[in-house]
Image (cartoon, rainbow, N blue to C red):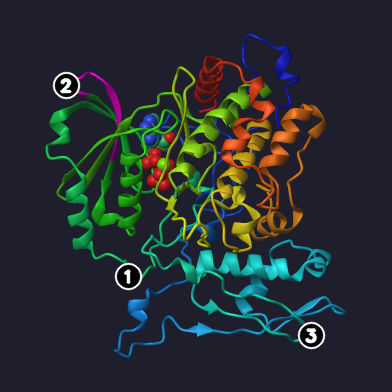
Amino acid sequence: MCDNGDPEDKPPAPPVRMSSTIFSTSSGKDSLSTNHSSKPLPSVPEERKRYKIISIFTGAEKISRKKDKDKERPEISPPSDFEHTIHVGFDAVTGEFTGMPEQWARLLQTSNITKSEQKKNPQAVLDVLKFYDSTGNGRQKYLSFSSSGESLNIDDDDDDDDDGTPPPVVAPRPEHTKSATDRQRKKSKMSDEEIMDKLRTIVSIGDPKKKYTRYEKIGQGASGTVFTAIDVATGQEVAIKQINLQKQPKKELIINEILVMKELKNPNIVNFLDSFLMGEELFVVMEYLAGGSLTDVVTETCMDEAQIAAVCRECLQALDFLHANQVIHRDIKSDNVLLGMDGSVKLTDFGFCAQITPEQSKRSTMVGTPYWMAPEVVTRKAYGPKVDIWSLGIMAIEMVEGEPPYLNENPLRALYLIATNGTPELQNPEKLSPVFRDFLNRCLEMDVEKRGGGKELLQHPFLKLAKPLSSLTPLILAAKEAMKGSR
Ligand code: ATP
Ligand code: MG
């Protein structure tokens, strides 16, 4: 929360958020310190500081799903992909689950989901346990649950997804929301050679070290290193992501990212410029956005409604464009919004996006980052483009409060709360204008049918409050200054 007074009344210096970066973490190694003052100045942008580390979401993968043709294979193999039915019941009198797998019982015990919450919605508890388990430790496929005491239903509803798209990955918020890919995955749907062949048809011929000069490292992501460089021919400053393919457990995601970026050009999308393959090294050249990510701005400064409206409008334009092209982004959050120094707002990170066809316009793969996930994703229902709208609503809350709801909750409880609480409540709703609250409610509508779509929300009166994008520049500068000061 911005706690330094009413930001609207205090031009010209943009208010700096006083209470960002306060969360220490519960798990050791990824721990992000709250005390920055003693740290040396890092040479690359420091990872986001405000998150608890939730290791359970790393290396996540959805439970294995075989293609039909695999199922038809005649050889007999070890039963590594068997389906297993488990019977879980709930005794409403004692408030205890019966027949619950030991692993789940353990998770539940440490989840901080209270007994009364469990009693209130045992089905949601099972939904999120199933979700949680499958993202973290997918080993078994829980097909259906039948009764022992009260009957609880956990039908597996994701068999419609064997379409060659990479399996879902849950990006952990912690490790700077790195889109961790699964290391346990046994086999890729395309062989490495097929992937390299496919890449060779996509990339340009030439040596990126000759076409671009003055490489300077600016960041490190899960999949590779990002540099700025100068295009020798045009003098244009670009961002280049260098990805060592040998180290990539999920090469399909990278192809996905390149194909989407290459085909979908829009002023609100970080535009793809070129790509090269040098041995095992893939170079993806894209436009450079010097303003950093929206995360820096939401954690370090206080945005006013007119600035929030401007960012929401720009993001909605990108989403409307993507959705019109049958693409769901699936990982909308402030980390994936990059800013230009002029205040331009662009979506990035298309590794997770899904192409939907009219025949198959709903998906049930779990992708994204838990705190931004729509309820229908958490409870593993089929979902469509409106999951991005929900996530945009959560991102709007980040712009108000500096972080998404439930960030301090035990992750399993956070999932339970997303599944059961409905539209999350704001810390200080009375501080927001009615038109902004209405906009949030339209994005964060539980009922997907009633939730606004991109086109519709672009007409929302809240967006009329938007200031020019140049009003974001002072925030970007203030965030950079604050980050410099805190290191
Ligand atoms: P992932 O590998 O899952 O995408 P990530 O988003 O942390 O993880 P990258 O996308 O590789 O990592 O980005 C690393 C850093 O470089 C981030 O801080 C990001 O904001 C920055 N960055 C990436 N692309 C650009 C760009 N086009 N312009 C400016 N900065 C960028
Ligand atoms: Mg990224």
Residue 417 placement, left or right of 215? right
Give the percent coordinates (x, y) of residue 162: 41, 68
Give the percent coordinates (x, y) of residue 94: 85, 79
> Considering the numbered disc 2 on the image, is that residue within a helix, a strand or a loop?
loop
Q: Which residue in the protein does label 2 denote? A: 233
Q: Which of the pair 324/312 is nearer the observer?
A: 324
Give whichever of discs 2 and 3 has the lower sequence position.
3
Spatial CA span between label 2 and label 3: 72 Å
Q: Is residue 43 visible?
A: no
Give whichever of discs 2 and 1 has the lower sequence position.
1
Q: Which residue in the protein does label 3 denote? A: 149
> Considering the numbered disc 1 on the image, is that residue within a helix, a strand or a loop?
loop
**Type of amino acid under label 2:** Ala
Q: Which residue in the protein does label 1 denote? A: 187
Spatial CA span between label 3 and label 1: 40 Å
Q: Residues within 10 Å of mark 2 (few under 14, many from 20)?
A: few
Can you say whether 98 is above or below 313 in the image? Answer: below
Q: Which residue appears at 55% of the width and 19% of the height?
A: 472
* The residue carrying mark 2 has its beta carbon less than 8 Å from ligand 1: no
Spatial CA span between label 2 and label 1: 42 Å
Q: Which residue appears at 41% of the width and 45% of the height?
A: 350
> Considering the numbered disc 3 on the image, is that residue within a helix, a strand or a loop?
loop
Give whichever of discs 3 and 1 has the lower sequence position.
3
Q: Residue lying at the far top in this picture: please name it.
A: 12
Residues in magenta? 231-241
Residue 390 placement, left or right of 318? right
**Type of amino acid under label 1:** Lys
